Amino acid sequence: MVFWVFLKRFLIVWVCSFSSLAAVTVIDLTQIESEVALYGPWTYHIGALNETQMREDGLKTVRLPHFFEEEVGSAHGVVTLELSLQTQPGVPLAMDMQRPFSVWRLYVDGAFAAASGEIDASHHRYVPHDGLRFVSFTPSSEVTHLTLQVGNALHKHLGFYGVPIIAPAEYLVRKIQINTVIETAIASILTFFGLYHIALFMAWRRDKAPLWFGLLCVVFALRAMTTGTQALLFYMPQTSWETMIHLEYFSGYSALPLFVLYIGSLYPKQSSRHAEHFYLMLSILFVWFVIFTPISLFTASLNYYELIVLTFIVYTFVVLYRSHKAKEPGSKLAFFAFIVFSSCIVHDLLRFQNLLPTSTDLLSFGFLFYLMAQGGILLGRYADAFKTIASHKENLEHLVDTRTQELRIALDQHRLLLRELTHRVKNNLQFIMGLIGILRKQNEADPKVLLGRLELQIQAIASVHETLCNQGRFEAVEMDRH
């Protein structure tokens, strides 16, 4: 279902893009009340041109989002775009640039409005300075011309993977504030749950699933703050463009190894150790790229990383299917939650390839839903563990009581045996002494005969004593067996 929705949206955008090449490049904003996406068509030219030159030579048109590598010949260079707007003079407007790659400079009616860095086409110098995204201006005429220069020398792509948005200034500011609050709330929730699961692991270290899940929550919290409206810039406005790119890719790439470890620890019987090691080695390699290589190198690895993510999604579905067949607790909920989560992942992957006309990251929202489901599954596992411990405790207490009673009975029997043994030995010794006294009074001349008779009598006494000691019970004697 999700795939067909994506395909439908893609076909609509493709048809609109194809039919717009001959469209009028003037967008009516006179009655604007909310945001309008500036898909275009934009006229464009390769290189850094001013507004007059653009009108003379701007014969090519394009709809955004779009990458210009094919037109420029590489991802390093500069492109100038122009769009005409029908506006109402004196009504303040604001634009959300939706994170074009690298650096941009905006002119409104030929006057400089804002820039996110330095563009020097003569020296091929395109240096982003910050993460500026929002530009405010007040039209002075009924037709406003936007001239936008986009340059790149660092990133894999030259162009946009989002569509610039224009809206009344108050509306856009309010929307930015709301989105910032939402993303901050999501990041806070993810951080809280992350620390909570890490604390669970510290309390019970035999199960590592809470540790990997807690770290995964923290990583997605970082990603929620560095994508979308980039709420991190609201709290740390001096954060550089390079730092934001590193944080964005680091949070994205480091999520895969943590998720591999989490799935392996949550479903050890259904997982493949060889597959886990394969994905761990590859994902750690990508994380190493982000930390130790230039932006132009690790951003170029995104397509390969996306392919690995897609294969891991398939592998995870196999693991969850096996867990469902094995009737693992919470397997149905885990399967459904992962469908939602993986749909958000596929959405963002298609957006990164400019196959969807949106600038909204759904990964954090999808993971928040997955977090709720997995939190319930982990709590269920811990509840079952506590029930098992309580059951074992009750069984152990019953066993201890039983063993204690048996030992008490055995101790009583031992005491009885000791008393009986002492009493019988004493009686037997007295009996022997009596026999010796009787023999001494007899007038038998041969002592050997007397000693032989005494020996037989003592053996009889020993036989009776042995028989009594070998019986299992000592509180009674069965006379008919002796």
Image (cartoon, rainbow, N blue to C red):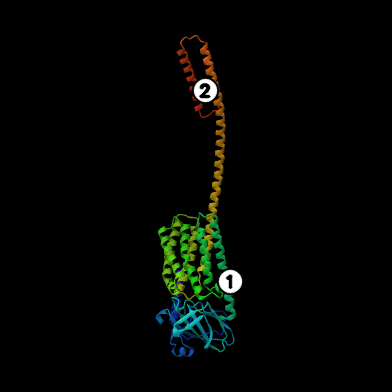
The tag earlier along the polypeptide, 1 or 2, is 1
Q: Position of residue 474 (x, y in %)?
A: 54, 28
The CA span between labels 1 and 2 is: 93 Å
Placement of 176 over or under 342, stated as above or below: below
SS state under label 2: helix
Amino acid beneath label 2: Met
- Residue 47 placement: quadrant: bottom left
Q: Position of residue 133 (x, y in %)?
A: 53, 78
Label 1, residues with CA under 10 Å away: few <14, some 14-19, many ≥20 = few
Amino acid beneath label 1: Val
Q: Nearer the viewer, residue 478 or 404?
A: 404
Label 2, residues with CA under 10 Å away: few <14, some 14-19, many ≥20 = few
Q: Position of residue 365 (x, y in %)?
A: 52, 68
Q: Nearer the viewer, residue 427 or 201?
A: 427
Q: Nearer the viewer, residue 4 or 201?
A: 201
SS state under label 1: helix
Q: Position of residue 342 (x, y in %)?
A: 47, 66
- Cβ–Cβ under 8 Å for marks 1 and 2: no
Q: Residue at x 49, y 73 (%)?
A: 245
Q: Residue at x 42, y 60 (%)?
A: 277
Tell me if I can see residue 419 in this picture.
yes
Circle count: 2
Q: Which residue is mark 2?
A: 479
Disc assigned to residue 432: none
Placement of 443 over or under 305, stated as above or below: above
Placement of 118 over or under 416, stated as above or below: below
Disc assigned to residue 181: 1
Placement of 387 over or under 103, stated as above or below: above
Tell me if I can see residue 62 in this picture.
no
